Amino acid sequence: TQDAEKSWDDELQQLVETLPKEQGWSVSNLYLYQGFWCTALTLRPLISFQTHFQEFDSDVITATFPKCGTTWLKALTFSTLYRDRFANPLLTSTPHQLVRFLEQDVYVNNPCPDLDNICVYNKPRLFSTHVPYASLPTSIEDSRCKIVYLCRNPMDMFVSLWHFAEMLRDENKVLPTPSLDEAFDKSCRGIHAFGPFFDHVLGYWKATQENPDKILFLKYEDLKEDISSQLKQLAMFLGVPFTEDEEEGGVVEEIAKVCSFENLKELEVNKKGVDVIGIPHKDFFRKGKVGDWNNYLTPSMVERLEKLIQQKLENSGKYG
Ligand code: A3P
């Protein structure tokens, strides 16, 4: 009802007022909620997701920190999981339309959406999230649903995020423009949507150590280096390993090719239009390279970030 809606809005407003606040990059403010930074606009769908999500044991969720290769992971997971079912929807829909964000899409306009109708296929259902592991609905941890996490070198993540924020500002000149230096300083202090980055990565890293059958931890750089072996690992983890016939018939290579940066970037569907929160589809495809940070970060920035990487990740076993 309208009354319930109004009282929920008031409660949310009160909550926002109690949260630590920082100026964001391309959005006016970020709020520290449950130990991570998010926009006021994300808070409402996020809480709906945390409160109302009802998982099935067969669900699959792709999880990423923004700019770590979400679009690629969505395309790869969708193509692998449903490979026997379709002609190729990636030619007519963007990866973000095929695998929808829970907190940034599905729950944005409806606190209790019909999740079965939201997915392209129902068994298994496939969703996506940027929410840190510790803030996922607790039922996800208790269930048997699977999570595929994709991580990326923080230097490339930062450069990608900075360009992304820049592209968004281009379309929307009213927003303030932090310099690369300012943005870098904020990033090192963990102030970016869904940050701190290292807490995000370590949350999923620890979870995968404890429960490797539930959470697969992939790296953008490994996908770039050897996509076939990574796709085979993904298929195995999802419970749909490639058969010998498929491997001999070139199915793995075909999926890699369809999902490649070069292919997706040139598709009409990814060049035009905007997503549910108004972001142009084309902004999800920039360079798609490993090591672009070399072209942007100064030696002192690299030094600062390397120290941080060492400090944050030194106790994290083989990750690094
Ligand atoms: P760059 O800005 O370094 O080019 P996300 O999908 O999480 O928003 O991440 C976007 C980053 O992934 C961008 O990185 C983008 O170019 C890159 N990307 C998008 N699609 C890709 C693909 N199919 N293969 C490899 N990288 C891809």
Image (spheres, rainbow, N blue to C red):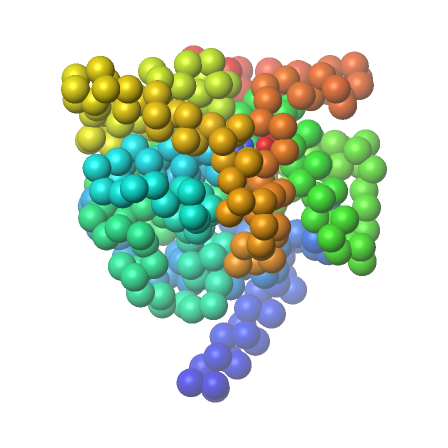
12 displayed left or right of 180: left
Q: Compared with residue 88, is residue 105 higher up or lower down, i.e. above or below? A: below
Q: Residue at x 59, y 22 (%)?
A: 289
Q: x, y (%) of residue 14?
A: 60, 69
231 displayed left or right of 224: left
Which of the pair 244/311 is nearer the observer? 244
Ligand 1 falls in quadrant: top right
Q: x, y (%) of residue 268?
A: 53, 45
Q: x, y (%) of residue 219?
A: 46, 22
Q: Which residue is drawn at 42% across and 85% down?
A: 1
Residue 299 in view here: yes
Residue 203 in view here: no
Q: Compared with residue 22, is residue 81 higher up or lower down, i.e. above or below? A: above
- Quadrant in the rendering for residue 227: top left
- Quadrant in the rendering for residue 258: top left
Q: Which residue is drawn at 28% across and 19% down?
A: 250
Q: Compared with residue 176, is residue 230 higher up or lower down, i.e. above or below? A: above
- Quadrant in the rendering for residue 81: top left
Q: Residue at x 46, y 33 (%)?
A: 72
Callout count: 0
233 displayed left or right of 62: left
Q: x, y (%) of residue 158?
A: 66, 31
